[in-house]
Every structure is written in structure tokens, then in C-alpha cells.
Amino acid sequence: MLKILEYSITHFCEHILRLRIEAAQDISGELYGASIPIMGKSEEECNFYLFFPKEFLKKIAEILINDEKFKEDDWCDLTKECANQIIGYAKNLLNDAKGDDEYKLGIPEYLGKVDFSELVLDEALTYKFENCYFRIGYCK
């Protein structure tokens, strides 16, 4: 699962947004979060959690929307859309590997400004773009 998640993050950041990201270890600061589940027919639900700093979301907004007048609700929508794009692509990769429509994507939930340290993930990947660090992980 981690390898598919890694490829999906790379696909979104480097292939779609054209942002060069690097693996990182630590993350801190004020982060906006979203969660989204993938449900498998034969497996239990897997919940994915995505944490982005506002600076990284601003860069995504510049690329995708080109609107500098974002309100708090707009950050909510953008965070959920990132979850849809990244985890939705991972779901498609899983379905390609398993065949049929083994996996279904749930509806993303906006978590607002979060302290991710309170959430224990089974596995997670942390990346940086310039001075912006973000983390995406999951728990079963």
C-alpha cells in the first residue's frame, strides 16, 4: 500500500502540478488536514490522512486555480480536492492491480487546522517542497 501511495503522491505533485518534491522526516507547524477512506470488497476500510501547510496549498491554488483571494472555505475545498486526487489515483492503481472494481473511494472529510501528532498512523510518507513539509499516511 505504501508503494502505491508513494507513486500517487509523486504523480500528483510532480506530473500534474510540476512541483519537485523530496522525501523528508520531520513535520511541524500549522497544518490543514483531510481524511478519505478506501473500502475494499474483501478487506476492511483503510483511512487516509493528508496534512498540508497553508503555504503549500497556496502554491497548489496558484497552479490549479490562479486565485489569490482564498477564504477559509476555499482551503477546505482545496484540501479535500487534494485528497480526492491523490487517494483517488491510488484507488485506481489498486483496482488496476486487482482487477474489477475491488476498491471504492469514500467522501473526503475536511479536518481543519490539525495537530497531526495526536493521530497515530500505521504508515506515512513525509515530503518537502521548498520550505513546505507535508505528510500523507493511513491506518486500517
Image: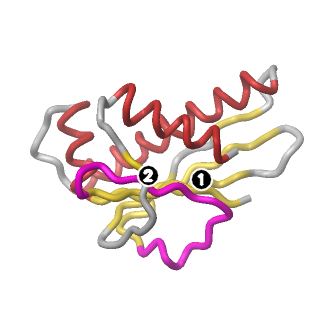
Residue 78 image point, x, y percent? 33, 44
Which residue is at the front of the view, 103 or 2?
2
121 sits left or right of 22 in the view: right
Circle 2: residue type = Ala
73 lies left or right of 122: left
Asked if 14 appears above or below 131 in the picture, the reply is above
Determine which residue is flagged by label 1. Answer: 48
Amino acid residing under circle 1: Phe
Q: Range of the magenta residues?
A: 115-131
Q: Residue at x 42, y 75 (%)?
A: 115
Which badge, 1 or 2, is on the more N-terminal residue?
A: 2
Tell me the residue at 36%/43% (across/down).
Answer: 21
Is residue 129 part of the magenta span, yes or no?
yes
| Residue 13 x/y as whole percent | 38, 36
Q: Is residue 14 visible?
A: yes
Q: Quadrant of residue 65?
A: top left
Q: Which residue is under mark 2?
A: 23
Left or right of 96, for residue 82? left
The C terminus lies in which quarter of the figure? Answer: bottom right
Mark 1 neighbour density, 10 Å: few (under 14) some (14–19) many (20 or more): many
On the picture, is 105 further left or further right than 127?
Answer: right
Q: Residue at x 43, y 46 (%)?
A: 80
Q: Quadrant of residue 123?
A: bottom right
- In this view, which residue lies farthest toward the bottom? 118
Q: Circle 1 sits in a helix, a strand or a loop, which is it?
A: strand
Residue at horizontal 48%, vertical 55%? 50
Give the image location of residue 28, x and y in percent.
35, 72
Q: Classify 36 as above or below 32.
A: above
Q: Are marks 1 and 2 in contact (CB under 8 Å)?
A: no
Determine the CA span between mark 1 and mark 2. 18 Å
